């Protein structure tokens, strides 16, 4: 192999490496782990069949247990309430949680810190809160559902003063 051929081979190798690097960088930037654009309009189909904009961030990359896959409710020592006894808006919120959204408020799905320790103590980030719409309220109101990463579920009608454990 003469010097000219070696030079062409080296140039071709550099070109191949450059193309592979560009392809790899492009794949990483557009792959499933790439962050979503904040200004992108995302919609989802809600239970009544219409579409609505998704305003809240996804609460977690870990899927929430569905009614058919949720483990039995662990006992916390709190008063309990059956899903059927939640207000209609609470049942609707629970359906949205099980479906992964879309949620009506951007705060839905944020971490609930449990600062007053009214719920069983768990590691930080374990609990997430969701708004239960209160008819007639112009803001989020006082009602919330709180989910735990292991499928436990709590309801508060008085903005975190008291909780009931929801039995599925």
Image: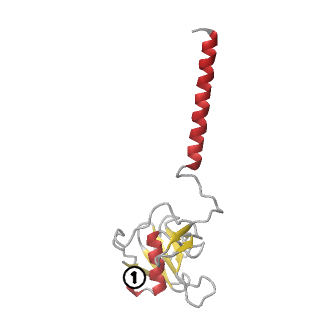
Look at the image and tell me whether residue 132 can be seen. Answer: yes
In what quadrant of the picture does the C terminus appear?
bottom left
Between 123 and 166, the one lying in front of the other is 166
- Residue appearing at x 56%, y 44% in the figure: 27
Q: Give percent across and percent down for residue 25.
A: 59, 41
Instruction: Single out the residue that lies furthest toward the top.
Output: 2
Q: Give percent across and percent down for residue 62.
A: 46, 61
Instruction: Single out the residue that lies furthest toward the right.
Output: 39
Between 121 and 142, the one lying in front of the other is 142
Look at the image and tell me whether residue 163 can be seen. Answer: no
In what quadrant of the picture does the N terminus appear?
top right
- Residue appearing at x 62%, y 28% in the figure: 15
Q: Give percent across and percent down for residue 29.
A: 59, 47
Q: How is the image coloured?
A: secondary structure
Total residue callouts: 1
Q: Is residue 44 left or right of residue 8?
A: left
Q: Give percent across and percent down for residue 31.
A: 54, 49
Between 113 and 20, the one lying in front of the other is 20
Q: Quadrant of residue 16?
A: top right
Q: Is residue 60 left or right of residue 107?
A: left
The residue that disc 1 covers is 83
Q: Quadrant of residue 6?
A: top right
Relative to 109, say whether 88 is above or below.
Answer: below
Between 140 and 8, the one lying in front of the other is 8
Mark 1 element type: helix
Q: Residues within 10 Å of mark 1 (few under 14, many from 20)?
A: some
- Residue appearing at x 44%, y 81% in the figure: 91
- Residue appearing at x 64%, y 12% in the figure: 4
């Amino acid at each position: 192999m003469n010097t000219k051929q070696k030079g062409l081979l080296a140039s071709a190798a550099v070109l191949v490496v450059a193309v592979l690097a560009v392809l790899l960088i492009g794949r990483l930037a557009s792959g499933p782990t790439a962050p979503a654009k904040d200004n992108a309009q995302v919609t989802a189909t809600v239970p009544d069949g219409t579409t609505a904009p998704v305003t809240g961030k996804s609460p977690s990359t870990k899927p929430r247990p569905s009614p058919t896959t949720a483990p039995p409710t662990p006992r916390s020592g709190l008063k309990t309430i059956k899903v059927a006894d939640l207000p209609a808006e609470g049942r609707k919120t629970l359906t949205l949680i099980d479906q992964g959204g879309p949620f009506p408020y951007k705060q839905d799905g944020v971490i609930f810190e449990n600062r007053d320790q009214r719920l069983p103590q768990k590691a930080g980030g374990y609990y997430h809160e969701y708004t239960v719409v209160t008819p007639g309220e112009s803001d989020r109101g006082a009602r919330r559902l709180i989910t735990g990463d292991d499928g436990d579920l709590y309801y508060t009608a008085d903005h975190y003063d008291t909780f009931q454990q929801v039995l599925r």
